[in-house]
Image: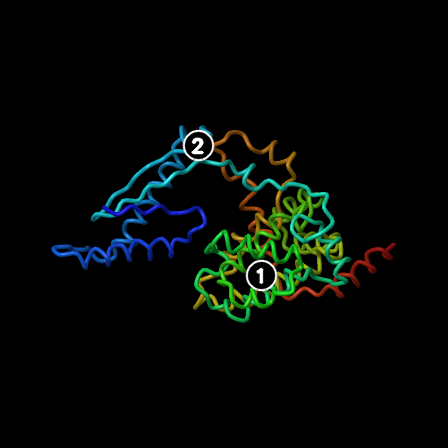
Amino acid sequence: MTDILPQPDCSLKAVCESLERCCLDQLEEPGSKRVPNTGARLWGRVRSKLLRQKLDPQTVETKNWHTDVIEMNGIKVEFSMKFTSRDMSLKRTPSKKQTGVFGVKISVVTKRERSKVPYIVRQCVEEVEKRGIEEVGIYRISGVATDIQALKAVFDANNKDILLMLSDMDINAIAGTLKLYFRELPEPLLTDRLYPAFMEGIALSDPAAKENCMMHLLRSLPDPNLITFLFLLEHLKRVAEKEPINKMSLHNLATVFGPTLLRPSEVESKAHLTSAADIWSHDVMAQVQVLLYYLHHPPISFAELKRNTLYFSTDV
């Protein structure tokens, strides 16, 4: 019997490869037989078991770890899990630190760097477009957690080896680092203040009224937030152009980034969350739709938006 203990920072691919290696090792033993794709099939059972546990009301309510074992063809997988509600897992922790980049206001970072878009955003985007834009499931498939934490530490320390480390790092870890940066901002990129207005704007049925509202909301963003958002927007559009290869459509990308860039404040989250089982609030689909609206929109120019701001301000 072979025991496999999946670690929290392992990717599905890594676990399957580990299981397959165990199966191949067993083939070398006299009298051993192996069913093809045992690793992938076994991990499929594990995932199915995890999903069933996640949907179990008793598992959702408890704060304790639940341990289980699944066995197939002489391979045994033991795993532990516990449920963390969405309001906790997506909770932003305001940071008072002024050093580093993670958990620091985007205006502070851009002012310190004397840049329009944070260095971490520019470098991660550049690396993804260089060698990850055709990667299947880019931004959807998680990178290894230890790699992401290593990149986080390097960017926070402004280490001189950043570029070398990026060139050697798994592309999914780099994509995960970019997502983590936005997730750990003290407030969402599209701001807490404008969140209710974004929710109202995307719900408008009149196309002209919606266009005016959604553009006005962009003009209302602080400059560092707006410039960074437009920069990310054009990057995601370029990623979606490779959808036939990477399988990431505009909708898929909006689903990944929407709830990260646009999220209610902690007070609003508590108001909407009615029970621990209410994992996805009713706002999530609207958050996705807001980003999808801008992704479908023709290219948006920062300069043009600002010119329109002047027109609005001088209109009598």
| 34 with respect to 64 (left or right) | left
> Does residue 5 lie above or below 154 as drawn?
above
- Mark 2 sits on what residue? 60
Q: Secondary structure at mark 1?
A: helix
Q: What x and y, as percent, mark residue 112?
A: 76, 58
> Does residue 45 lie above or below 159 as drawn?
above
Locate residue 232: give its quadrant.
bottom right
Q: What x and y, as percent, mark residue 208?
A: 67, 56
Residue depicted at x 60% and y 36%? 269
- Mark 1 sits on what residue? 296
Disc 1 residue type (three-letter): His
Q: What x and y, as percent, mark residue 218?
A: 71, 55
| 274 with respect to 51 (left or right) | right
| 24 with respect to 8 (left or right) | left
Instruction: Give the residue at the far front of this rendering.
Output: 29
Which label sits on residue 107?
A: none
Residue depicted at x 63% and y 51%? 206
Visual colour scheme = rainbow
User: In front here: 154 or 297?
Assistant: 154
* Residue density around tag 1, few if under 14, some if 14–19, many if 20 or more, within 10 Å: few
User: In front here: 68 or 205?
Assistant: 68
| 205 with respect to 54 (left or right) | right
Which mark is nearer the camera, 2 or 1?
A: 2
Locate residue 236: give its quadrant.
bottom right
How many labels sit on residues? Answer: 2
Disc 2 residue type (three-letter): Val
Residue depicted at x 72% and y 43%? 96
Residue depicted at x 49% and y 60%? 172
> Does residue 201 lie above or below 116 as drawn?
above
Q: CA distance from mark 2 to mark 1?
A: 37 Å
User: In front here: 117 or 101?
Assistant: 101
Q: Secondary structure at mark 2?
A: helix
